[in-house]
Image (spheres, rainbow, N blue to C red):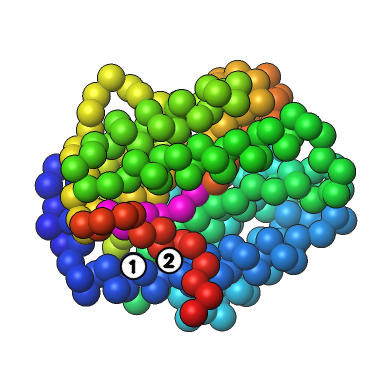
Amino acid sequence: MFMKRNYVIHTAEEIARIRQAAQLTARVRDQVRELVRPGMSTCELDRIAGTLIAATGGTSAFLGYNGFPGNICISVNDEVVHGIGRPDRILAETDIVGLDIGITYDGGVGDTAVTFALGREVPEDVKRLLENTEKALMAGIGRAKAGNHVCDISAAVEKAAKAARLGIVREYVGHGCGTKLHEPPEVPNFFCGQRGPELRPGMVLAIEPMLNLGSYKVFTETDRWTVRTADKSWSAHFEHMVLITENEPEILTWPKTT
């Protein structure tokens, strides 16, 4: 690992470990998503995720991190990020659910998130939120190329979000992720007036738009973790880890079929 003040370049050996951790995390993300049902509590869902994470041979990258009490983050409807599984929070068919999952495995860390609707009949504004938050993520990934700068990713996410008329959360941003859950640099979802570091092969970034149907403003609940929209509008969160290469970006948390 070569670490400058504002970015990290990982070695080939580290990248192999990060790639493996990221793939395990993607697998658990998809397994948990398949198991979510209306009528479940978010606490039950957290326990299921904990069992699936343990089955990989890894550990939750979130449990105990700065005191976080859950195996994964489960954010529902107007909850933006960092939702804690609760026995009294029962999922309904009308809900949307955000799963944010991190796994530490053999010296590498995976981090990924997805938001989806539980019911088959999804209101048009919720469809707009979900589809365009994922599109914003892919737009950002498309700019994650060597020679570009962090701001190019940020600007691409912002452009897609504004085109869809969605509020862009500003207090929480993407980040480097590799041998630690959070590494430099920060990756905002909007252009903040600075270029940020140049993207170089060996950098690993967790790009994660958090977009709202209403205002960008958010607040943290009294549990000190759960972040909600200030205006109670619904929110979506999508995240992939991306390796900067000499050519196209490699999405490490994209499920591999071979």
Q: Residue 31: give x, y in percent of width and height.
A: 65, 69
Q: Amino acid at mark 2?
A: Ala
* Depicted 18 relative to depicted 227: above or below: below
Q: Residue 229: give x, y in percent of width and height.
A: 63, 26
Q: Please name the residue shown 28% across and 37% down the image.
A: 150
Q: Secondary structure at mark 1?
A: helix
In this rendered view, identify the residue nearer to me: 79 or 121: 121
Q: Tell me the magenta residue range.
A: 239-244
Q: Please name the residue shown 31% across and 33% down the image.
A: 152
Q: CA distance from mark 1 to mark 2?
A: 6 Å
Query: Can I make out residue 3 in this image?
Result: yes
Residue that mark 1 sits on: 18
Q: Amino acid at mark 1?
A: Ile
The N terminus - image quarter: bottom left
Q: Residues within 10 Å of mark 2 (few under 14, many from 20)?
A: many
Q: Secondary structure at mark 2?
A: helix
* Depicted 61 relative to depicted 221: above or below: below
Residue farthest to the front, as pictured: 247
Q: Residues within 10 Å of mark 1 (few under 14, many from 20)?
A: many
Q: Residue 183: give x, y in percent of width and height.
A: 28, 49
Let me know if residue 240 is in the magenta part: yes
In this rendered view, identify the residue nearer to me: 103 or 204: 204
* Depicted 155 relative to depicted 28: above or below: above
Q: Please name the residue shown 32% across and 45% down the image.
A: 144
Mark number displayed over residue 22: 2
Q: Please name the residue shown 26% across and 42% down the image.
A: 185
Q: Label 2 near label 1: C-beta < 8 Å?
A: yes
Picture quadrant of residue 122: top right
